[in-house]
Image (cartoon, grey):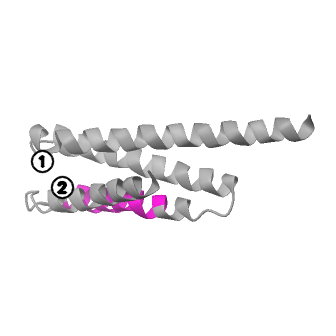
Amino acid sequence: MVELLKNRTKKIGLEVIKLVDELPSKPSAWAVAKQIIRSSTSIGANYRAACRAKSSADFIYKLKIVEEEADETQYWLEVLEESNLIQSNRIIQLKKEVNEVVSIVVASIKTVRENENNKSKNRKS
């Protein structure tokens, strides 16, 4: 699962890079392009960092960054779509993938927190 998610998060960044190359050559597109490349490539980079976390707290902290960057990427995809800089049908699958990654990350954070709470309760018993 870890390797699969590493690949999925990296692929989001790669897909966004390809998408940006399709944008029209105008200042508004350049501004959004810089933002979405930064946030989308950060998803994979920060997920890799999370995989190397030194503790559960560190893991959760880094996964929260992944969640934030993925949410920001969703925002920029919406901006591209709503500003008509890109056709909606071009980004349907990418939006779906980013949303799935957000869901997985949020569920992972919840699971780790629950596991930590259970460990705490067991130690007190």
Q: What stretch is highlighted in magenta?
A: 30-47
50 is higher (above) or lower (below) than 104? below
Quick one: 109 or 65, which is closer to the camera? 109
Q: Do the residues labelled 2 and 1 touch (CB within 8 Å)?
A: yes
Instruction: Pinpoint residue 119: horizontal percent, then vertical percent.
Output: 78, 41
The residue indicated by pointer 2 is: 28
The residue that appears at 47% across and 63% down in the rendered structure is 48
- Label 1 sits on a secondary structure element that is loop
Quadrant showing the C terminus:
top right
Give residue 30's quadrant in the image. bottom left
Q: Please, what is the dominant secondary structure of the magenta stretch?
A: helix
Q: Is mark 2 on a helix, strand or loop?
A: helix
Neighbor class of circle 2 (other Cα within 10 Å; few <14, some 14-19, many 20+) is few
What residue did someone put label 1 on? 85
Task: Point out the tag, 2 or 1, that comes first from the N-terminus.
Answer: 2
Disc 1: CA contacts within 10 A as few (<14), some (14-19) or many (>=20)? some
Name the quadrant containing residue 20. bottom left
Based on the picture, tell me whether residue 35 belongs to the magenta stretch: yes
Query: Who's the residue at 36% across and 39% down the image?
Result: 100
The residue type indicated by label 2 comes to Ser
Q: In this view, does 77 lie to the left or right of 72?
A: left
The residues bearing labels 2 and 1 have C-alpha atoms spaced at a distance of: 9 Å
Residue shown at the point (23%, 57%) measured from the top left: 16
Residue 25: % across, % down: 8, 62
Q: Which residue is drawn at 12% across and 63% down?
A: 21
